[in-house]
Image (cartoon, rainbow, N blue to C red):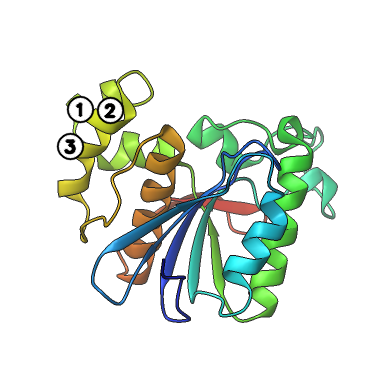
Amino acid sequence: MPSPAADSLCGLDFGARTAGTTVVVWNGRDGRLHLRACPRQTDADAWLEGLLMPRPPRLVAIDAPLSLPRAYCGPNPDDAPDFFFRAADRLAGAMSPLFLGGLTARAIALAHRLRRLGATVLETYPRLVVQRRLPENLQARYRHDDPEAFARDLLPLLPQPCAEPPASWHDVDALLAWWTAWRYAHHQAASLGDPDEGLIWY
């Protein structure tokens, strides 16, 4: 199976370390999207290291918090700083990076390593992509329908076909993350939040 090339765009649904819920999607040189899921009981951090670090993609959109609230990261001019949510989390209806704890720390560490190797790394939130980019009939089915049925209706909306049929919601979320990377690369993406604190792209 092919691996991401240095000029590829990647979407990453970033999951718990050994749960088998981490999925990467990238565009291959064959013009199709490729999907790879980390096996259960495999260290997802080591798996991603082996998959992405030898030839880092030029752009990666990650479904995980990539920063902390401003209260933890320097002077805060507010009288009552928010220690739980960033502005982007409140605007997107996302979970607190603090609630996600170790997952947030792992994602920030991965983003740091990728950026040091020259990749552009974005934070994305698939539910926001669904709300802002998909038609109402698909919005209502997200996380309520069978993921394979949802994916069949999602795939025609994407700019490239998928080589492997998505089989789980983690696969779907990685596809939505890739779509954010594609939109960013084509100057069609938008973001929520404070640039000095952390943006969520969609």
Residue at (80, 48) in percent of width and height? 76
Q: Which mark is residue 76?
A: none
Classed neighbour count for the residue bearing mark 1: other residues with Cα under 10 Å, few (<14), some (14–19), many (≥20): few
Q: Position of residue 160 (x, y in %)?
A: 22, 61
Q: Position of residue 124 (x, y in %)?
A: 49, 49
- The furthest residue to the top: 144
Tell me, yes or no, if residue 202 can be seen here.
Answer: no
Q: Are marks 1 and 2 in contact (CB under 8 Å)?
A: yes
Q: Which mark is residue 136?
A: 1
Q: Nearer the viewer, mark 3 or mark 1?
A: 3
Q: Secondary structure at mark 1?
A: helix
Amino acid beneath label 1 = Glu
Quarter of the image with the N terminus is: bottom left
Q: Nearer the viewer, residue 183 or 190?
A: 183
Amino acid beneath label 2 = Gln
Residue at (52, 29) in percent of width and height? 93
Classed neighbour count for the residue bearing mark 3: other residues with Cα under 10 Å, few (<14), some (14–19), many (≥20): few
The reply, left or right, for residue 160 in relation to residue 106 is left
The residue that label 3 is drawn on is 153
Residue at (41, 74) in percent of width and height? 8
The residue that label 2 is drawn on is 139
